[in-house]
Image (tube, rainbow, N blue to C red):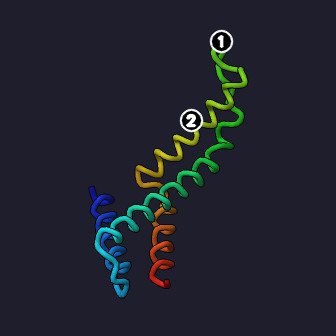
Amino acid sequence: MGELANNSLFELQAGNALAQGRGLPNVRRAENLREAKEVSEDFEAVFLSQMLQPMFENIEAAKPFGGSPSEKMWRTMQVEEYGKAISKAGGIGIADAVFREIIKTQELR
């Protein structure tokens, strides 16, 4: 519950920062925030997937179901989904940092 409240407050502050001096319509500011949040979460998901990948490299699948070439492809997709799930559940803070930097960059324009 506390994490949700922090995210809402952070988004409100980011929206206010983005609105200052820009004169953009409210709809466009909301779209910018939504896009920035989505991009930052995607970035964190990719990063987490890359960090998790080595953990699963040496795990062999049990017979008779594992061992085929498709096992490696499936494992890669599974790790990508783990990264997405971790990021969507709050992640490790990378998405928040990337989000702040995107907002700062937009303010400088």
In the structure shown, which secondary structural element does the residue marked by tag 2 occupy?
helix
Are the two marked residues, 2 and 1, in contact with CB atoms closer than 8 angstroms? no
Q: Vertical placement of 102 versus 58: above or below? A: below
Asked whether 43 or 87 is in front, the reply is: 43
Residue 27, by quadrant, is bottom left
Per the model, the C-alpha gap separating discs 2 and 1 is 20 Å
**Horizontal relation, residue 93 to residue 33: left or right:** right
Identify residue type, mark 2: Gln
Between 94 and 77, which is closer to the camera in this rendering? 77
Left or right of 79? Residue 69 is right
In this rendering, is residue 51 above or below 34?
above
Q: Residue at x 33, y 83 (%)?
A: 23
Name the residue: 45% across, 58% down. Answer: 38
Q: Which residue lies furthest to the bottom in this view?
A: 21
Residue ID at (50%, 46%): 84
Q: Disc 2 or 1, which lies upstream in sequence?
A: 1
- Kind of residue at disc 1: Pro
Q: Whole-percent x and y of residue 102?
A: 49, 72
Nearer the observer, 40 or 48: 40
Element type at marker 1? Answer: loop
- Image side of residue 5 versus residue 37, left or right: left
The residue depicted at 27 percent of the width and 55 percent of the height is: 1
Q: Is residue 100 above or below residue 34?
A: below
Circle 1 residue: 64
Q: Which residue lies under the disc numbered 2?
A: 78
Image spot of residue 105 (x, y percent) = 51, 78
Mark 1: give few (<14), some (14-19) or many (20+) Cα within 10 Å: few
